[in-house]
């Protein structure tokens, strides 16, 4: 497969020209009924409204050309079929397939990557048996009682996605089941989580592909010692999700072990067993399968070549327009749903770890912006917080709103003729409009410049299915952007340096306590920083 | 008081020249022992390490000149003494004093703003009596039992600061006491919070200065109806924090009411009764007073004219250097403390709502960048998420790390010779160093460009006192930056437009349900957006 450099595409040059005079959303009738109706794309129950972006048909056509020229859908299909896309040409790299989509390709009669989907099905079958054993009282605590809580012990990809999904779908928990998450190496995190639990009815699900993640192993030790102090047998309370053959794939130490595979990166692993075990425990097997079904449908929608009917691809391209051509370096993702409170944190990982790169797949430095800084909080909370800057700040921040027409709980109250859910959605649409259109006023402090690009994603209700679709929508959007920028969205070399340096500092700290010489010299920045920070004398 | 335009200061021109060749952190010996020792400033138990910023003595001298020329400390003192700094010259504006510092000036024999401090003391005395009544069983539920939970119902400034502080200080709760927070207009937020509670032992603390905040009133109604459904008398379970004489200052409907004042903005109100009632309930009166003491000490430290010994001012100026002169538009605040998990969200409000402005205090458009986009998550979690972009992304993101030498719970485990807390701090320092220094490597994908500016704030332990200091450190940093940019950091006109538009959309939705004509015409963007979103037929 030939990759094209982003900066040399014909479409890129055209888009640069078009960016000199982007669509002006503040003109009278800029947001006319025709435009609002036309700038709308749908997939898997989500409507994407993008009339409030600074683009017109000429820009959309150029973005379509960019997609075609760079072969974005071809690359996506190649990914799904198992191409080795996690690599850098002519340099040592991970050299792996990228097959998170295979976990949900279980509904096709002919999966695109049969072997990976077969492995996913095997794991799902094991999960189903495990959940049935729990359900039917074959897996119980020493007193014969059922387990009520599962604590997922993981970090990064083994934490953020499953956590975001669990919080989003808490509403659909099985009666008497709940989940907690333990990630940070901060010992106070473990102490706070463990102090709240009935340990005797808790299962701990330790998740690490290598079986050697420092934070996770440390937290596992804290968990084991807490169980022992409570007179409980850790082997009865721990399960693991790990690579086959890792130190954590050990039936003597874990009640059950589920497998994860090299071809699924941590940040894309929520629909593998990394998310499956805890989400299955909390929502039931069928609930987890609904998430997969929603994701699978979105993976299929992402195969469309026409950007106007491929929502993930369109969102990717609009992001590129705002980022590379209009020059906005950040992206706010603002869900109008409290249940999505940790979804922006998951996206922060998925997007910034994937596309925060500066080397092309050919091994050359990029000459253009790559992944944006992604951040966000649920609305309407944010409206009372940072929206001031979105409306009147000196920096323009593109926004992706996410909302639902109906609430999850259905416990609502009519005040002044509308429900809280209607207020939530009305606020979201009002913000979209206000950011785009702005407002003139004789008082300069009450002026709103407008032309702040944004889109709205809206669906009926946040359910396991729609959550699965939303997750895959963003995963696919991020992959498309990486393909366009010609970077490897699937490695994370940038996290290595910190690990090496931390190891050196810790060796020194351990040595100082022993009174033996450590690895650092008196002239080294490491040692002097430890001193300046008051960590050693 | 004469304000100076940021762009015409002599120091500004000098800093622009210096920015052409900022200190290169990647040179050999760039981080020599002398520099690391010298680039260190302390206040209230916090050490600020800033050797890893791209500045040298020439830049520091120019920043000192900027502080002097713009009269930053004079403006801060004027603020503390009650100057009307919440205003825009020659235009309608809030025209208010800015006196959050007066809430904690209770320890001085001669307060700088005696009247406001006297009012703060009266409220504190009322809080003390209320907490004693709870303690001694004079305020109980209908069965004569004590209250165990307080739910704070508020949004924005009435939520984020108190919530961040409560989570940070949960460790220091009184036995049997806890707090929850309810903010979003999303009905699922209320349903989720209320479904977890023993309502009979819960007090609800409704917080709104005007007594008319839409989200808060709606949630209060949900709370009242839940109490009634449970056969409980709402008047027995509700207290309020509000402006004197507001609709919420009503003893028939609230068991107690505490007052907030016009001269304290929402985002600066955590040390007023807005934070005091819930934090006092959870931590005890003395715990809350310790927060005030920490904040007061930092307010005093912020009066120093020498930027090298005034940590809030120095952080403000370093931020300006990175933002206005080196051109970095975002700021990541990364606490290596799980307890500080919501502190970045509080800062997002405090900073972005304060300084996300484009009009000077003279009423003119600014010609320079103002407040940055602030975001962050606790480390080490973030290391496994977005740090990839921080190290190798095409966009440079300045970082402020925050850490503590000791844990809160003291429940720690030695693995490979070091505790988890030591691992936490070592990781933070390693990241600081890695970002600054970078690394060369023959594999371009394993190269780190370095020169990513950052500082480290470190203290012994996260306690009520140090939390108060940290809060005030950032409040004062933000105020100093606003003074430098010559903007009004204390209003929030940017939140008004969305409110007006949302009101119009809601009127239409209510009318549609009634089958009566609403305010919107068929040509309006509002109506067509409602249609495109599928909210009306």
Image (tube, coloured by chain):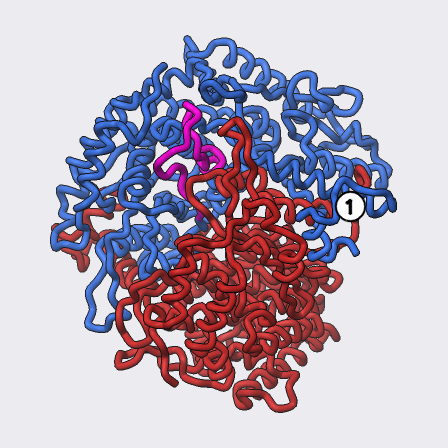
Chain colours: A red, B blue
Percent position of residue A527, x then y: 19, 51
* Element class at badge 1: helix
| Visible residue check, residue B113 | yes
Which quadrant does the N terminus of chain A fall into?
bottom left
Which of the 4 image quadrants contains residue A217? bottom left
Q: Identify which residue is drawn at 18% across, 40% down.
A: B18
Give the chain letter at badge 1.
Answer: B
How would you classify the magenta stretch by its main secondary structure?
loop
Which of the 4 image quadrants contains residue A119? bottom right
Foreground of the two, A241 or A478: A478
Q: Is residue A448 magenta?
A: no
Placement of A233 over or under A138, stated as above or below: above
Foreground of the two, B96 or B253: B96
Q: Which residue is mark 1?
A: B509
Foreground of the two, A126 or A32: A32
Percent position of residue A467, x then y: 64, 65
Q: Is residue B353 magenta?
A: yes
Placement of A102 over or under A358, stated as above or below: below
Q: Identify which residue is drawn at 78% across, 53% down.
A: A410
Q: Identify which residue is drawn at 42% across, 24% down.
A: B361
Q: Residues within 10 Å of mark 1 (few under 14, many from 20)?
A: many
Segment tinted magenta in the rendering? B350-375
Placement of A193 over or under B95, stated as above or below: below
Which quadrant does the C terminus of chain A fall into?
top left
- Taking the image as shown, residue B369 lies to the left or right of residue A468, namely left
| Visible residue check, residue B162 | no
Placement of B194 over or under A281, stated as above or below: above
Percent position of residue B294, x then y: 42, 27
Q: Identify which residue is drawn at 64% across, 69% down.
A: A43
- Taking the image as shown, residue A484 lies to the left or right of residue A502, namely right
């Amino acid at each position: 497969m030939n990759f094209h450099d982003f900066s040399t595409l014909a479409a890129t040059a055209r888009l640069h020209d078009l960016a000199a005079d982007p669509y002006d959303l503040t003109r009278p009738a800029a947001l006319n009924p025709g435009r609002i109706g036309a700038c709308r794309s749908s997939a898997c129950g989500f409507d994407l409204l993008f009339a409030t972006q600074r683009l017109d048909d000429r820009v959309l056509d150029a973005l379509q050309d960019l997609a075609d020229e760079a072969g974005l859908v071809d690359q996506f299909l190649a990914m799904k079929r198992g191409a080795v896309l996690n690599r850098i040409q002519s340099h040592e790299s991970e050299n792996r397939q990228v097959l998170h989509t295979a976990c949900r390709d279980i509904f096709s009669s002919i999966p695109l990557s049969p072997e990976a989907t077969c492995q996913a099905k095997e794991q799902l079958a094991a999960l189903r048996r495990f959940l049935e054993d729990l359900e039917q009282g074959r897996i119980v605590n020493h007193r014969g009682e059922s387990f009520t809580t599962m604590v997922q012990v993981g970090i990064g990809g083994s934490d953020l996605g499953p956590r975001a999904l669990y919080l989003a779908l808490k509403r659909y928990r099985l009666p008497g089941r709940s989940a907690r998450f333990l990630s940070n190496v901060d010992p106070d995190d473990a102490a706070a989580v463990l102090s709240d639990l009935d340990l005797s009815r808790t299962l701990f699900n330790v998740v690490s592909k290598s079986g050697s993640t420092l934070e996770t192993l440390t937290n596992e030790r804290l968990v084991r010692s807490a169980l022992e102090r409570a007179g409980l047998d850790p082997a009865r309370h721990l399960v693991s999700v790990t690579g086959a053959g890792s130190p954590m794939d050990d039936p003597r130490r874990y009640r059950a072990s589920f497998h994860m595979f090299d071809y699924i990166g941590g940040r894309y692993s929520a629909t593998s067993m990394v998310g499956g075990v805890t989400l299955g425990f909390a929502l039931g097997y069928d609930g987890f399968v609904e998430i997969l079904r929603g994701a699978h449908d979105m993976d299929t929608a992402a195969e469309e070549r026409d950007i106007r009917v491929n929502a993930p691809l369109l969102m990717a391209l609009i992001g590129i327009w705002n980022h590379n051509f209009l020059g906005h370096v950040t992206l706010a993702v603002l869900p109008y749903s409290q249940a999505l409170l940790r979804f922006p944190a998951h996206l922060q990982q998925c997007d910034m770890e994937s596309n925060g790169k500066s080397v092309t797949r050919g091994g050359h430095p990029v000459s253009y912006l790559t992944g944006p800084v992604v951040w966000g909080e649920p609305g309407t909370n944010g409206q009372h917080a940072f929206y001031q800057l979105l409306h009147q700040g000196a920096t323009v921040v593109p926004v992706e709103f996410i909302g639902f027409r109906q609430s999850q709980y259905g416990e609502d109250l009519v005040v002044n003729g509308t429900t809280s859910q209607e207020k939530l959605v009305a606020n979201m649409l009002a913000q979209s409009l206000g950011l785009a259109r702005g407002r003139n006023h004789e008082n300069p402090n009450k002026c709103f410049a407008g032309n702040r690009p944004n889109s709205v994603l809206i669906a009926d209700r946040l359910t396991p299915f729609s959550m699965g679709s939303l997750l895959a929508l963003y995963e696919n959007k991020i992959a498309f952007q990486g393909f366009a920028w010609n970077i490897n969205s699937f490695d994370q070399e940038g996290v290595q340096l910190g690990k090496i340096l931390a190891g050196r500092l810790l060796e020194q700290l351990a040595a100082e306590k022993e009174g033996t010489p450590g690895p650092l010299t008196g002239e080294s920045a490491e040692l002097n920083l430890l001193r300046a920070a008051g960590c050693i004398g």
